[in-house]
Amino acid sequence: MGLTARQSGTLEMTAAMVLSGFIGFLVVESGQSVWNVIFFRCLFGAISLGLYCWWRGFLSPWPLKGKAVLTAILAASALVLNWVLLFNAFNYASISLSTVVYNTQPFFLLLAGSLFFGEKIALGKLPWFISAFIGLLFIIEISGSDFAGDQQLLGFAMALGAAILYAVNTLLTRRLVEIRPEVIALVNTFIGCILLLPAANFAMLPVNALSWSYLLILGVVHSCLMYILMYSAYKKLPISMIAILAFLYPAVAILVDFVVYDQSLTGYQWLGIIVILLSVAGLNLGWGLHSIGFKKSPKIS
């Protein structure tokens, strides 16, 4: 028996979030500036996606027409600017603060989905969103001192802006129902190359093959394979499922730090990871029966 659309979408989204957990490691090990990392991620991603789409015949005839072109461009711009804001937030606020603020994006997804698209939020599932966020707080272990200083506030604003832009990208991508995820990812990386070309510093390129390999992996795996999986999942899953699975990203990142950099995990961090995984299971298994939501506003002609 084959997988249902929901089951395959859940597996795709889970795989994408697991891959996301390795992005920080690759960025750090590349030794490049934020601008160079994002530019080469987009460049290698666009090349690999372009070749793949051409080989599979996805580009003939060109699938983006009419309003879909503008939607795809806006979605791509939101994603690229999301990367810029998030990676630069780490220069002003602590990584802990930036991460926890950025991971408020599932709540923006839920609110926007309910207000603008009429998607119901299951009342019985709300505790799983709350518990997932609490689990994230346990993982990050934020202290009150993290909020001190004007630079911290600037980092907070950047991370919050990145969260909103990620939610915008998700909602716009879900509207491209007839467009293959490979083509959407190709447009994202192509637009990223154009937007970031002026900011790239070609005088400070990697000097060894290992550093180049990290950038290549970011492009081929994390901007090609990962986004193919993620955008395919967006079309198969309700916003609520996308939102809860997104919490796997920080949990995996913590585990990568532990394995690769021998970062010790505290009892609170292990508790947070367990809470997040239980929250994912709670939503997946449908532990909630009642629904609430806003009615979709009537169209005004």
Image: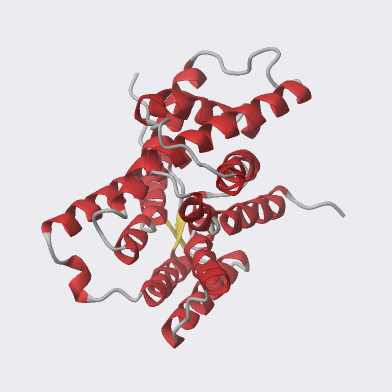
Q: Nearer the viewer, residue 83 or 7?
A: 83
Residue 203 image position (x, y, % from top left): 40, 32
Q: Residue at x 56, y 72 (%)?
A: 277
**Residue 299 left/right relative to 144:** right
Q: Quadrant of residue 38?
A: top left
**Residue 102 left/right relative to 41:** left
Residue 75 image position (x, y, % from top left): 44, 32
* Farthest-out residue, bottom: 267
Can you say which quadrant of the picture contains the N terminus? Answer: bottom right
Judge whether residue 299 can be spotted in this image: yes
Number of dots carrying numbers: 0
Coloured how? secondary structure
**Residue 179 left/right relative to 70:** right
Residue 46 image position (x, y, % from top left): 58, 29
Q: Nearer the viewer, residue 292 or 241?
A: 241
The correct choice, above or below, for 83 with respect to 136 in the image is above
Can you say which quadrant of the picture contains the C terminus? Answer: top left
Q: Residue at x 22, y 69 (%)?
A: 146
Q: Nearer the viewer, residue 5 or 288?
A: 5
Judge whether residue 295 can be spotted in this image: no
